[in-house]
Amino acid sequence: MNAHPPAVGRGPAPAGRAPTLADVLALPVLAAGQPQVVTGLAQLERPVRWVHITELTDPASFLKGGELVLTTGMPLPEDAAGVRRYVEELTEVGAAALVIELVRRYHRPPDALVQACRARRLPLITLARDVNFLEVTQVVHALILGSQAEAMRRTQRIHEAFTALTLRGAGPQDVLRAAAEMSGRTVVLENLVHQALICEPSGSTVEEALGDWERRSRTAGPGDRTEVAGPEGWLTAPVSYQGERWGRLVMLPADGPVFGPEHVTVLERTAMALTVARLIHSTPWEHAAHRNALRELAEQRHHSPEDVHARCAALGLPTDAGVFVAVLVDPGPGVEGAEAEARLHRELRSAGVPALVGELSPGRLGVLLALRQGRPWRPVAERLSRAALALAPGAVVGVGSDVADLADTARSFREAARVMEATPPGQPLPADRSFHELPDVDLRRLLYALREDTRIQDYTERRLGRIVEHDDRHGTDLLTTLGHYLDAAGNKTAAARRGGLSRETVYQRLRTVERLLDTDLESGAHRTELHVALTALRVLRAGPGGHPG
């Protein structure tokens, strides 16, 4: 008979979903009959939508699908052909399972019935002991009606949650996060060219969700309506407004029950909320997706290298490119960040350079260039810089070093950020290019970057404070003379010439400096310390945003 015991010790069905065959078999009222699953063990997660007691030879005419059919076996045909027809009719109408009591007519299930149920994949369950079918009906129907009421309450809560999101103007990231939390499934928003713009994973990693995304998405059909489609069984829904499609939502399947009405409700309400968000927020979804990906890369907020590769590949960035380079652009005052962002997007597209472009922070744009092996990145950076300068002549562009792996781009972003911190407004451009690099950061620019560090301020005051106070009190100009002397690398004759002073005057002033600072200016180490302090003082006196020197 190849019988198997059903699951035991199983709790009640989760609130809000129809009970399954396994849930029903675990109920005490049926468990008392010692149920055995003869066929269809793999179908125990089928939902049970009603219970039907029958002693008719053609019960299918009274069924609508999803019923648990209970019988004593009395009406079963004697011949094998009649049994097959009986099972076929139950299968065609969509019965959940056939339960036969082995007490009155049969003490073991007929072979013809077992074979027919196995052939049509209809679960066949036998009861070894007498069971009150009416009591089974009452208990299961109460369970079904309770789950339906809970499903209605949960649907109402879904509607209320998305209404609240819409009223507070939530962005697409917040909307998808709520959808993933409510459904317990991974939810993805893609554009019309099958690029995954936002992914909110649930129970899976970004790598698992987005791996080989474009190919998988194209096999899932056009997505013109809400449906389960494709070889992976994705639940999809279009995002559109007044007949114009903007993208598609995808809810990925997970282990356990298939998609139910609640999942459809969540996905359709997500699509509605995204439509409102797109009308409210002017930033295109693609730009927002680039921003989020760039911030994850620059701040190393991704969970693993595999996740960041999957996320960027799903956005259309070639993650197997030979070279990645980070570029930072500060357009300067009077230039809208969105305008600069769009301009750089267009420039890179026209150059045929794959890249992510987005605002990393207010007033600062980030660009990640992805170039094939052997293609030099400097001409691309130069073209990008000139485009930024054409839009905003006061723009500052900093470039990090190239890296070979996408997961290492945070280093390139850090280097570009150090360049930007050390590059004051108005800093002259290098003679051979229109952007700044890490080798450009000399002592003066390094101290400019550190100008707000109290340790630099304290160092400067301890080294030069007495001279500054002496000049203020007596109207002298020792600091200027010291500067000429240090800039001339300790050459007193050159210092006198620079200051338009006699050599004797320079000698006298330098002796006063030595006395005030208790130092020996003939010492190279002491001169270096004073030169660093004087350079820092010049930077500090330039003020915030000022040009040091």
Image (cartoon, helix red, strand yellow):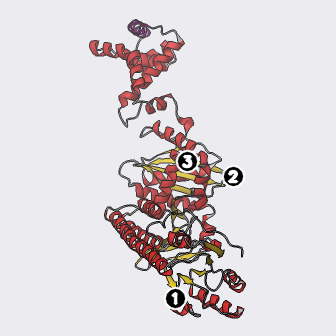
Q: What residue is disc 2 on?
A: 373
Report the amino acid beneath label 1.
Leu
- Circle 3 sits in a helix, a strand or a loop, which is it? strand
- Circle 1 sits in a helix, a strand or a loop, which is it? loop
**Residue drawn at (35%, 13%) of the image:** 466
Could you say which is closer to the camera, residue 350 or residue 485?
Answer: 350
Residues drawn in magenta: 503-518
Q: Residues within 10 Å of mark 1 (few under 14, many from 20)?
A: some
Q: Is residue 357 above or below residue 271?
A: above
Q: Is residue 515 magenta?
A: yes
Q: What residue is disc 1 on?
A: 63
Single out the mark in the foreground, 1 or 2: 1
Could you say which is closer to the camera, residue 361 or residue 191?
Answer: 191
Give x and y (percent) for residue 37. 64, 73
Report the disc number at residue 226: none
Position of 171 with respect to 190 (left or right) is: left
Q: Residues within 10 Å of mark 2 (few under 14, many from 20)?
A: few
Magenta: main secondary structure equals helix
Q: What residue is disc 3 on?
A: 326
- Circle 2 sits in a helix, a strand or a loop, which is it? loop
